[in-house]
Image: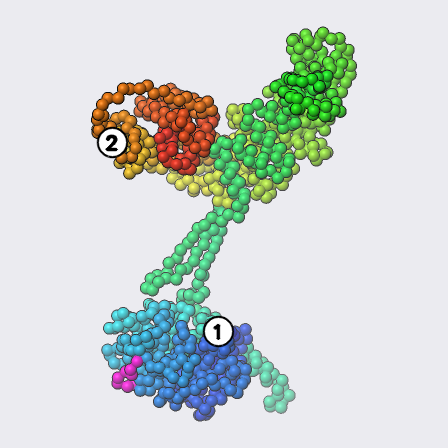
Amino acid sequence: MKLKEINRTALQAWSPAQQHPIYLAAGTSAPQLDATFSTSASLEIFELDLADPTLAMKSCGSVSSPHRYHKLVWGPHGIEDQSLPSGVLIAGGENGDIILYDASKIIAGDSEVIIAQSEKHTGPVRALDVNSFQTNLVASGGNESEIYIWDLNSFSSPMTPGPKTQPLEDISCVAWNRQVQHILASASPSGKASVWDLRKNDLIIKVSDHSNRMHCSGLAWNPEVATQLVLASEDDRMPVIQMWDLRFATSPLKVLESHTRGVLAIAWSEADPELLLSCGKDNRILCWNPNTAEVLYELPTSTQWCFDIQWCPRNPAVLSAAAFDGHISIYSIMGGSNDHATTLQAEQLSSSFGNMDPFGTGKMLPPLQLPQTAPSQSTVTPLKKPPKWIRRPVGASFAFGGKLVTLDNIKPAAQQSAAHVVHISQVVTETDFLDRSNQLQATLTAGNFLEYCQSKTEAAQSEFEKTVWSFLKVNFEEDARGKYLELLGYKKEELALKVFLCAHSDLIFEFDLSFACGFQITSAELEFLPMILCWLFASDIDGLITQALLIGDYEAAVNLCLHDNRMADSIILAIAGGPELLAKTQKKYFTKTQSKISKLISAVVMKDWLDILETCDLQNWKEALAAVMTYAKPEEFSSLCGLLGSRLEAAEDAALQAQACLCYICAGTVEQLVAYWAKAQDSSSPLALQELVEKLVVLQRAVLRAQGGVSDMGALLAEKMNQYASLLASQGSLQTAISYLPTNTQQVTVRSCALSCVDGHTRESLPDSDLLLLLLIICNSISNYNDPNLFCSSAGPQNGWNDPPTLNRAHKKKKIPENFTPPAPITAPIMAPLGDPQGPAGQTMQTLQSQQQGPDQPVGPATFSPIQQQPLGPPGRNPNMPQGNMEGAPGAPIGDLIKPLQSIPTEKITKKPIPEEHMVLKTTFEGLIQKCLAAASDPQTKRKLDDAHKRLEYLYDKLREQTLSPAIVGGLHNMARSIECRCYTDGLNIHTHIVSSSNFSETSAFMPILKVVLTQANKLGV
C-alpha cells in the first residue's frame, strides 16, 4: 500500500532509528537525469507524517550542492551526545569526494551545513555504509579497488582494510557485518565478494559464482546469522539473489529466483530477518523469506524500474523505493487500500475548478465522475505471515483457582526454530487470609486447639476479642465450668479469704492467725489487715453471699447469713447444703425475712432456673450465666445458656447484645452463634470471614468433643462454609477448600450430591487435583438450587454414597530385602564400641532407615486419620562380633585382646541414687516401655523394647552424675510431659530439637533409644 510520494529523481536515505520524527533525505542522483535535463543538484529532507492523508510529503529543508551523488547514507553519529542532534548525512560524490552534512542544520535552514569534506577517492564513490556498533566508523568504496575506513572524529586520515584486490576493479557496494563489528564485506560488478577482517587488516575470504555471470548490484548481511550474506545480480541472464554461508563458501546456500530480469537493489530488514526486499528491471518489488526462498509479498509499482530500495529504521513496516520515473514512493507492507488517497486527490482537483466557467457560457462544470473500480484492484493483500515486530512478545490470562498462565516468545538461536514456553503460576492476593487459613488447617490437623486459642487470645486487639477466645479455650481444658466462673470474675480462693475476714474480724490483732483454704497470715502481713477489712465492710454482704452461692460454697453462704443475723436465709441454704450443715444451722433461731437475694435462694433450693433467666435483669447477665454454670443439669444446660443469649441479643443496649455470643459459646449452639455474628459483623472481606470461620470451627470441634459424635450443620453455617471454601479455591487452596464443604446438613447437601454425580470410574481415573476441581465445580453449580437432588442419580443409595472419595494416594516404597544388612557408617567407632552393634550407632542407622511419613493429609476438619511413622526392623546382628560392653578411651585395647597380668578381686559398685527432681524421667520412660511391651505382639518388637530398657541405664547414669546440660535435662522433662499426655508426635519433635541443638557426644548414648521407644509407642497407640 502506497503511503507517500516525492516527485524527485534522487537517491534516498532514512533518518536513524534514534531520530524522531522520521525524515527522508533525497539527494540528486548522478547516474540519472530528469525530464528537464537539469544538471543542478540539491539535498532535501522530507518529514514522514502518517497522520496526513495526502500523498505529498512536507519538505523540512534543502540545500543546493555542486555535486551530484552516487550514494547517500544517514548515520546516528552525534545523536547520543547531542553534538549532532539529528545525526550526520554522508554523501558520495561523482568526483571521488565524500561530504558530511549536519542534518539538523539543513532542517533548521542554516547556510553552513557541511561538516567536513574529502577527495581521497580517485573516482565516483558508489558504496557507503555506517558501522552499527561504532557509529563513527564509515566504509566507502570507489574505483580501482579503493576501500577506505573513515573515522568521523578524525576525518582527515582514513585507513584501508588491507591491500587492494587484484585485478583492480570498481567497488559497487560495501556492508558492515551486523553481528561482528570488525568484519566488512565488499562487492564488485564482476560478481566477486570480499570479506575483510579489520583486526588483521587483511582479506580473509572471497566469494564468487563459478558461472562468472554474476554482476553484483547489491550486498547485505544477515541481521542475526553472522556468517550469512546475500548477493544480487543485475545481469539479465542471471537475475538471481544468492544466499551464501561463509562456513560453506564453495556454493550458494540458497538461490532466490523470481525476478525475470536483473536485480538492481536489495535491502534486508533489521526488525525481521525473514523479510528481504529486492527490486529489478522487471518493474517488480518483491519481499522474500530468504530462509525458505519464498516470495511473501509483491508491492504494487509503476511501469518504471526501481533503482534503490530501503527499509525505514524506526518504523519497520515502512519502506521507500526510488524509480526512474522521477518518484520516490513510500509503501507499507501491512496491506490496506488507496481509495481514500485517490478520492481525496480527485476532490482537490474538483474544488480547484468548481466555481469556474472556462467557456463563458454561464454554466458551471458538471461534477467529476470517477470510474468505479473493483475492490480487488485497490485493496492490497498484506503479508502471508505476520512480521516479527507485531507478533505478541508476551501474554497472560487468569484461570480457575488463582492460576496465571503466561507466555513469552524467546528469541531462538541461529538455525533453530522458535521455542514457545507457557508458564503457569499461582497468584495470591490475600496473603494474610491464606496464612491464617493455613494456620487454622494445621490446627485442625494436629488437634492442638488449646495452644491455638491461647495464641489467638494473646494476639487479640480488643478486650472483648480476648474474652471470646478465652471462653473458647476453656472448652478444651479440664473443669470447664470452673474456668468459666474464673473468667466471669468468681474465684473461690478470693471469696474464701473475704468470707473468713468478714466472719473473724475480731482476730485482726492476734498473731499466728491461720484459716481455711490454706491461707496463712504472718506478722509481717497483719499491718495490711485493717485496710483489707475497711474495704471489705464497705462492700455489700449480699455481694459476698451471692458470690459464694454462684460458686457453690454453701457453708460460706450460711456462715455469712449467720454472721449478719439472717436466720431464714441460713436455714434455707442449710437445707440445700445437706443434713450436716442443716444440723449446725438449726441451733440458732431464725426468722423469715425478705431480702434482696430471696429469689436467688429460692432458685437454688427449688432448682427453678428457667424463671430466673426469663425474669432477671440483663445487667446481671454474668450472675445469671454463672448460676446456670453451677446448678443447671447437663441436659438443660445448653438450652438455658441459649435462652439467656437470646434475651441478650434482643436487648437494646449494644454492649449487652455483644455478650450474647459468650452465652452461645457456653451453650455450644453453633447455628445461633453464626446467626448472631452474621448480623453483628461484616463477613464480606476475606479476613472478616476468616475470623468468623476460625471461631466457628473451634466451637464446632468443642461441641463434637463434648457430644462425642457428629452434629448436623445448619443452613446458615453451610452457607458460610461454602463461601469460605469458594474463597479458598479462588486462592488456589483446592485441597483445603473441599474439606470445608458441608457434609451432613439437610439444607444444602452439596457435597453428597457432587459425589453422587461423579461415578466410580471417574473417581478412579481422574488425578486427585482434577477430581477436587470437578467436585468444586459441581458444588458451585448445585448450591444455586434449592433442591440439590435434581443433580443426583435416581438410583438407590450405594455403598459409601455419602462418603468423600478417597484422595489418599500412597507413594510406592522400594521393597527392602529381608536379609539386607546396612553397611556400618564411618562414625561407627565413635558412636558405639565394636562389640555393641545395637548401641547408639546401630540405633542411628535404624533411625535413618525409618520410613518417611506419607504425604496424605486429612481432607476435612471433622475427621482425622494421620499415618503414623513405622520404623523398619533393626539391622541384623553379626554373630562374629564380640558381645558385651567394651567402652574405653579412644585407641585403648578392648575386649580380650590384652589379658590381665593378675586377677583383680571384684568389688561391688554402689550407684548413686537419681536426684529426686529427675526420678519422674525414669518412672515415665520405664512405664512407657512396660505399656508398649504389654501391647506388642511381635517378638522382634519386644526384643527391641527389652534392649531399650537396658540401654536407658546410660541416661540414668548421667542423671546420677549430673553431667547433662540444663538444656538437655529441660528437654527430657518436656518429653516426659508429652508422654504423660500421650502426645508422642510432640515428643518426637522435642527429641529432634534436643539432638540438633546439643553436643552429639553428650546425647548419642541414649537419645536414639528414646526415639525408638517413642516411635513404637506412637505405632502401638498405647
Query: Which quadrant holds residue 666?
Result: top right
Judging from the image, what secondary structure is the residue with disc 1 in? Answer: loop
Q: Residue at x 32, y 75 (%)?
A: 199
Image location of residue 74, percent across then percent down: 44, 79
Query: Which quadrant holds residue 96?
Result: bottom left
For the residue pair 980 and 48, the one nearer the viewer reads as 980
Q: Residue at x 30, y 37 (%)?
A: 827
Image location of residue 292, percent across then percent down: 33, 67
Q: CA distance from mark 2 to mark 1?
A: 83 Å
Would you call the spot at circle 2 few (<14 residues within 10 Å), some (14-19), or many (20 or more)?
few
Image location of residue 78, percent across then percent down: 47, 77
Tell me the kind of residue under disc 2: Pro
Q: Magenta includes 884?
A: no
Q: Which residue is mark 2?
A: 893
Q: Magenta includes 168?
A: yes
Would you call the spot at circle 1 few (<14 residues within 10 Å), some (14-19), or many (20 or more)?
few
For the residue pair 31 and 238, the one nearer the viewer reads as 31
Q: Which residues are magenta?
A: 162-169
- In the image, is residue 638 above or below residue 119? above
